[in-house]
Each structure stands twice: as C-alpha cells, then as structure tokens.
Image (cartoon, rainbow, N blue to C red):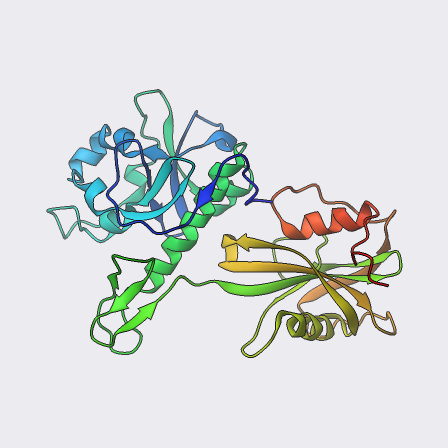
Amino acid sequence: MIQDIQPRKFNITYKNIEAADKDYALLFHEEAVLMRQADGQDNVAGFLTFEELKRLDIYKSTEMEHAEREAIYLFSIDDDNYFLVNHMVCQGHLSNNQDKAFDPMEWQGIKTEDGKVLVWHSQNVFRTLKEKWVGFAGITAMQIDRWLLQHKFCGRCGSPLKHSKTERCLICESCNIAQYPKISPAIIVGIVDGDKLLLTRYADRPYKRYALIAGFGEVGETLEATVEREVMEEVGLKVKDITYYKSQPWSFSDSLLVGFFARLDGDNTVTLEDGELAEGTWFSREEIPVNNEEIALTAEMIRYFAAGNDVFQGRG
C-alpha cells in the first residue's frame, strides 16, 4: 500500500526546527504540487531541496531568501526533513511586493542546474511514481497543506490562527481553541458469502474499477457499527462476524481507512439503496477481476480474498 515504504522510515513527530539546505521544500498551489523531473518522465518526479530552490533565478526575484527560516516543518523520512513553503509564497510573507499575486505558471518549465524541469502535477501523480516513498511523502504533505489552507481563521471569533511551537496544531489566542489536522475515519468492508465476495462499482465517480463497500464513520458510531450501517444503506444486506484486516492512511481524502471482512447474514439479494452505487455483484474467488494496483487497501483486500486466504482468521 502507499504507506509501505520499507526500508525507509516515516516519522510524523512534530519538530520546531528550521530547514537546512539539504531538506526538501514542497510548494503547492491549490491541488497541484511543484516537482522536478527529466522532461516527459512524470513517474520519476521528485522534490526540490532548499539548496536547489535557492539556485533558481525565480527564487531570487520573489525575494524568498529567508524561506528556510519560515518554512513549516511537515515530517521526516529517514534523515530527510520535509517542509512546506507555499504559504509564504502565496500569502506574500517573503516578498516586499505584497500586491503581486503568486503566478504558478511562472514556475512551470523552469530548468534546474542538472537539466531537470519544474512541472506542476495534480495529486494523482502520487499514485504512479516509481519511488513509492516519494508518492507517500507528497500526498501526506498535501493533506497537511489542505488543512492549513482551510484553517486560516478561528471558526468561533474569526481571529487569525497561529502555529503552535510544540505540536502540529493551530491556536486561536483569543478563544484558546486548538485545531488539529483533519483525519476522517472510514471503513472498507469485504462482504463474504461462502467462497464469494461482493464487488461494487460507483455510479458517479471517475473511479470505474470494482471496489468494496466503503463509507465514513458518523458521530457516536463504533467502526463495526459503521460497517453494518454502510452495508445496509448501500446494498441492503445484513452482516456478521466483522473481522479486522488492516488500516491505511489515505491522504487523498484526508481519511484513515480501516479494512474489515464480514460474513453475509441472511439473504444475499443486493438492493442498491441510495444511488451511490451502479453495481453490486457476487464473484467467486476464481471469477474475481483482480486489481493489481499496489497503493490501495481495497485492491489488496480483493487480492487477499481471491488468493484463497482465511479472511476470518479461523473464526467458525
């Protein structure tokens, strides 16, 4: 899955530190990220270090000479630290010209000293990068960036929020309210009937491959209760023997996904209840259309069942 970057080690522990030249400087604009790559080779794109950033003429023209001092620490992978710099660029924090709007296209196509080019990519690039750890770093950073962009001001009094110096948190000094990164718990469930697995397709989403039932937890619910409710709402079935499989951080939707398998309890007639799904079909292990996508929990769960594994870990 996307977080499986071994032998590299991801460390989200907050640090109140300044960036060094060797650290990575991540620049986002809306839902795009700036990366360096050989021309046309999107699957091997990478991030600029502060040293590489400071060598760019555009860096000097936007007066960003103090970027490493004011950059926002994100996390580390092994001994590499990752920082966010776009808040300073977009909000004019590092420019003497406060009236000049940030133009992302001024960065597009710039050549670096080693012959690479700068390219703006959507977050989908993180699904396909050859070096999986770069994709995981990028999408995790984008989740933190979205949270910061959506929490500039206190929702109670409207005062600007400030960064805590001790933890990853935004604080309203007027209300003494703390805002932490958005993480939405969600379930994925493989519904099993003997040697058959229920696969579904979404009705109104770009993703058209087969998937499993999924949905977000509601206030007051356990994850097991979320499984039962989502299954009933989406396909009109009852389940039992809800068994944990694995979890996965899924920063594409600011989620923490928790995977379960569950046995069908009663009639197996599928009723598409709420219009979210276009199809719900039972497949035997031999018939399952296997998805070889490596980054997603759903695809791994489908493959795990299709391979003949005991998904209930010996329970009955």
Tell me the quarter of the picture where residue 21 sits.
Answer: top left
Q: From the viewer's perspective, is 271 left or right of 82?
A: right
- Tell me if 312 is positioned left or right of 67 in this view: right
Q: Is residue 269 visible?
A: yes
Q: Position of residue 151 (x, y in %)?
A: 32, 65
Q: Position of residue 199 (x, y in %)?
A: 77, 58
Image quarter hosting the C terminus: bottom right
Is residue 208 visible from the viewing direction of this image? no
Q: Residue at x 32, y 69 (%)?
A: 178
Looking at the image, residue 167 sits to the left or right of residue 299; the answer is left
Give the mark count.
0
Residue 74 screen position, x and y as percent: 35, 48
Q: Nearer the viewer, residue 111 or 186?
A: 186
Q: Which residue is depicted at the point 38% across and 60% down?
A: 147
Seen from the viewer's position, the closer of residues 138 and 116 is: 138
Task: Reply above or below: 82 against 182.
Answer: above
- Residue at 32% from the left image edge and 61% from the top image edge: 169
Q: Quadrant of the N terminus?
A: top right
Residue at 31% x, 43% y is 104
Residue 212's place in the image compared with 49, above or below, is below
- Name above or below for residue 211 compared with residue 113: below
x and y percentages locating residue 7 in the rendered image: 53, 34
Residue farthest toward the left in the current orientation of the protein: 96
- The residue lying toward the viewer, choosing from 298 and 205, is 298
